[in-house]
Image (cartoon, coloured by chain):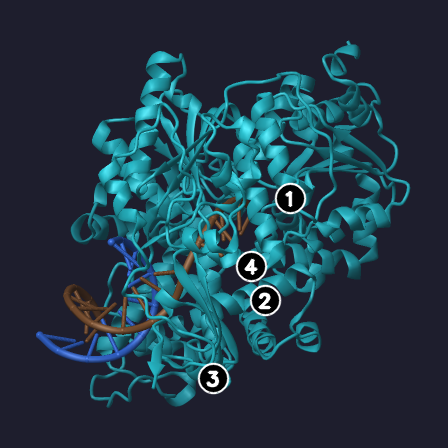
Chain colours: A cyan, B brown, C blue
Amino acid sequence: MNVDVLQGLNPAQREAVEVIDGPLLIVAGPGSGKTRVITHRVAYLMRVCGISPYRILAVTFTNKAAREMKERLQRLVGTRADQLSVGTFHAFCAALLRREGKHIGLDSSYTIYDDEDQMNLLKQAMEQADIDPRRYPPRAIQGVISGAKCLLMDSHSLSLNRKSYFEEQAAKVYQRYEELLARNNGVDFDDLLLKAVQLLRNNPEVLKGYQRRFLHILIDEFQDTNVAQYVLAKLLAEEYKNICVVGDADQSIYAWRHADIRNILSFQKDYPNARTVTLAENYRSTGTILEAAKHLISSNRMRLAKDLWTSREGGHPIVVHEVHDEEEEAQFVIREVGHLTSAEGFNLGDCAVMYRVNAQSRALEEACLRYGMRYKLVGGVRFYQRREVKDVMAYLRLISNPNDEVSLTRVINVPLRGIGQRSVEGLIRWARSEGIPLLTALERVAQDGGDRASGNPPIPPFSKGGSGGISLSPRVSRPIAGFARLLKGLVEDSRRLNVVELIDAVLERTGYRQYLFDRVEMAEERWENLMELRATAQEFRHIGPPDGLADLLERLALVADVDNYEESPDALTLITLHQAKGLEFPVVFMVGMEDGLLPHVRSLDSAEQVEEERRLCYVGMTRSKERLYLLRAFRRGFSGGSGPAGPSRFLYEIPDHLIASPTPKASRKRPSPRQAQDAAWGIPALLGEGPVLSRSPERSEGTAEGPEPSLPSLKTGDKVRHPTFGDGMVVSSVPSGGDYEVTVAFDGGAGVKRLLLSYANLEKLG
DNA sequence: CAGTGGAGGCTTTTT
DNA sequence: GCCTCCACTG
């Protein structure tokens, strides 16, 4: 019985399963059976080594991966799999904080803020810190704060280690932002990790408990972990040092989210005796595809080479095709998919179209609709980000955590109750000056504000009245009082109702349902979404108050999507390259193979970023099992106007002999600087045409024209004016993906900026 | 207080 | 080119 856990594994896989003592690094190339190894390893630990599932922790990057792992393990070891700790870092930390948060002053009913909530709070913090959001984009500030948190830095340490004036400003916001979070009894996603680490570091006895519990720790997608996650894992593994990490640096595509490939190096340094097992056999792709991908990725300097191989030699050549624009690109995909499904035995569900940015899905979707091809768009607006869902969630959060002012301000006037922005602001200011929670302020208005004689002169917006009350006109106070009563009633309901009943109560008693159908467009669809939320809540209905609500809210905060990607046998998949990671398809179309898109313009200023783009390209190519198409358009309507675009540099990194109907040798060489210049203006560099491919000549000709006359040329030394940054001098101007990337040194505090000419709205000064 | 229009701003995305 | 946010008007 114990034998079958090892059966069917190749020698490397077998080693990765059997080496259980001490630290282990598994380097897992694409399609190397990684998931199989992980699940079999866990099964081996349990069934062969007799280790209790309670003492095994397996951490994954996404909920989906966690779910799949659990399902597979259930098949391998049965119901004992339920006792395993399998989940994401964030979920693990959320549970830890709920249980042990009291050690760091966090109430167990804390709220987890998502991106949108976080930005709301951050903007407030910026206002309080008196930092101009025009000069310091909140998004960028958020990025700096998040980056600091992922390195386990607090605002003080960010301030000390600042590398720029910008970071110094960010540190100021950070401090305020933390104060606001604390007042709201809220945490953001990064806090889950940061606070978990803080908690464990500052509470040795708590830490010891977990260290002794987890005899074996596994981390999947190790290349995607950030420093905080690695430190957390290291802390937990300190007792037994049975830590197994699985990853592939070549598939690291989340550095921009503070994932740090250097964790792999740190691992080898922190555990000098760590064993390394490389899974090099690829079971997914044809020899041709694997060869092309290997060749591409070998251009990266920051990597450890590994020798991937497959027994599936040869295979269909890769099709590289040029089209005029995105419309033609979509048309080509549709025609080709039609051919593959009607004549070559593929199913529609076998095919996927992958792209760099979501905006590219539009042309594809339109084409699918026009030609009547079934498709499945992955991603888009996520479920828990939809307004109606977030509104109802805000009510639920507020019931659970009355200190949550973000949620309170979100719903105090939804449905419309005549409580305007000014009233809310006044209320908040008043509550702060009195040092009372916002909810208490509401209740006070309900107690005495509502009945106050109308003869009282309203002092807008709020002012202190006698005995800690406030005086305001009934027009303002009545709806506020009404809202306070509503909330109080719902909090009482929550003590006796299960979560499903509670959701129903919220929908009815707040008047939300009525509001939706009376006043909101597409009410049916939105209602459907709310019913889906209600369906999710069913899972928690048996958990009595107040835990049911807390559990539901945790789930809603940590599980991003109900309709995560699921295979649909009869639809063409449209998906971003990022989301495609971990998936595989018999047929893959990669569209938008242009410099400026892949690699993306925003990555062109650093070699590291271009390398990440190359990895992204590598990830896309290695999703394919049988057929791979690389499409490139001469001209693409991209944000800000349409411009010609040169072929992706990555196309030149694929050997000729792997490409269908090889193009003339001369044009397949890496372009000379002159050619690169031409390419940037859309002058065709790839002249060859495959047999399947036809390009309408009359349209193609139109692309060979010169630069758009509308783009003014700027040269070094020119004086320019920018609407927000003010006056400055051009330092450099280089063509970039059909645009110009202009570097400008501004006179004021703005410093040196890199701008895209078509976005920047620069005025040339005589 | 609430609905409308103009201006500005633009990857990738899970938790 | 399209969506989002803010400012203004009704």
- The reply to whether callout 2 and callout 4 are in contact (CB within 8 Å) is no
Q: Of the residues tagged 4 and 1, which is closer to the observer? A: 1
How far across and how far down the image is residue A551, in percent?
A: 54, 44
Residue drawn 30% across and 48% down? A703
Q: Of the residues tagged 3 and 2, which is closer to the observer? A: 2
Up/down of A325 relative to C10, above or below: above
Q: What type is the residue that disc 4 sits on?
A: Asp
Local secondary structure at mark 1: loop
Asked if residue A5 lies left or right of residue A592, the reply is right
Q: CA distance from mark 2 to mark 4?
A: 11 Å
Q: What type is the residue that disc 1 sits on?
A: Ser
Q: What type is the residue that disc 3 sits on?
A: Ser
Q: Which residue is mark 2?
A: A145
Mark 1 residue crowding within 10 angstroms, few (<14) / some (14–19) / many (20+): few
* Dots 3 and 4 on the same chain: yes
Mark 3 residue crowding within 10 angstroms, few (<14) / some (14–19) / many (20+): few
Asked if residue A467 lies left or right of residue A217, the reply is left
Chain bearing tag 3 is A
Chain bearing tag 4 is A
Circle on res. A433: 3
Q: Looking at the rendering, which quadrant does residue A41 occupy? A: top right
Q: CA distance from mark 3 to mark 2?
A: 28 Å
How far across and how far down the image is residue B4, in percent?
A: 14, 66
How far across and how far down the image is residue A481, in percent?
A: 31, 70
* Dots 4 and 1 on the same chain: yes
